[in-house]
Amino acid sequence: MERITWDQFFMAQSHLLALRSTCTRLAVGATIVRDNRIMAAGYNGSISGGDHCIDQGCYVIDHHCVRTIHAEMNALLQCSKYGISTNGADMYVTHFPCLPCTKSIIQSGIRRLYYANDYKNHEYAIKLFEQANIEVVHVPFDDRKIDFLSDQKISLYMELLEKLRVSGASPEELAPFELKVKELFGM
């Protein structure tokens, strides 16, 4: 098994956090890190004890769901709540931050921002990160790297393909399935 990098590890953590999201429009996760140690984390969801989008639907005003707090803000607020300084820390987020989150990230002293997916990357947000000398790093995330059952799945698919081959399936018939297996598992 190939060992993942620290960047991949923290990005995987953010993707795992996104699975806790209660927003039906976009699931986002964020992790704040210093010296390869997780300090705080957040996902987009409603205030504690509040109604959730998954239960009540999104509350949309001007094309934005106002029911949720963004993942980046939840992570920053967790640090604030527990008295943890974010000055000089790094943030890993599943999607490029919106403009209000960008400003909060800058004001909190985050020195590097790592993101996996482009998402409405606002031109002004990019300019603000540049002005603040915050390094912005795109970390492509391959969720196949955190599939703990990938070896078993590959074995099963290969066994099924072999059974099809033995039962008379032609190479032409099997080719699309073999290609799909290679794509799914990055083989």
Image (cartoon, grey):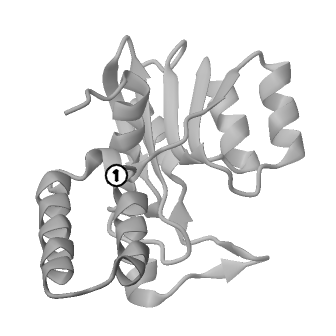
Residues 130 and 55: in front is 130
Tell me what residue is drawn at x 44 percent, y 88 percent: 56
- Amino acid type of the residue that numbered disc 1 sits on in the rendered structure: Arg
Residues 50 and 171: in front is 171
Query: Where is mark 1, residue-wise?
Result: 144
Residue 43: % across, % down: 42, 54
Q: In this rendering, would 118 be left or right of 73? A: right
Tell me what residue is drawn at x 48 percent, y 44 percent: 141
Residue 184: % across, % down: 38, 62
Residue 186: % across, % down: 40, 50
Tell me what residue is drawn at x 40 percent, y 82 percent: 54
Residue 83 seen anywhere in this rendered image of the structure: no
Q: Is residue 28 above or below residue 175?
A: above
Q: In this rendering, would 125 be left or right of 179? A: right
Q: Is residue 159 above or below residue 58?
A: above
Residue 154 seen anywhere in this rendered image of the structure: yes
Question: Which quadrant of the figure contains the N terminus?
Answer: top left
Find numbered disc 1 in the image and state the secondary structure of the residue it sits on. helix
Which of the 4 image quadrants contains residue 40? top left
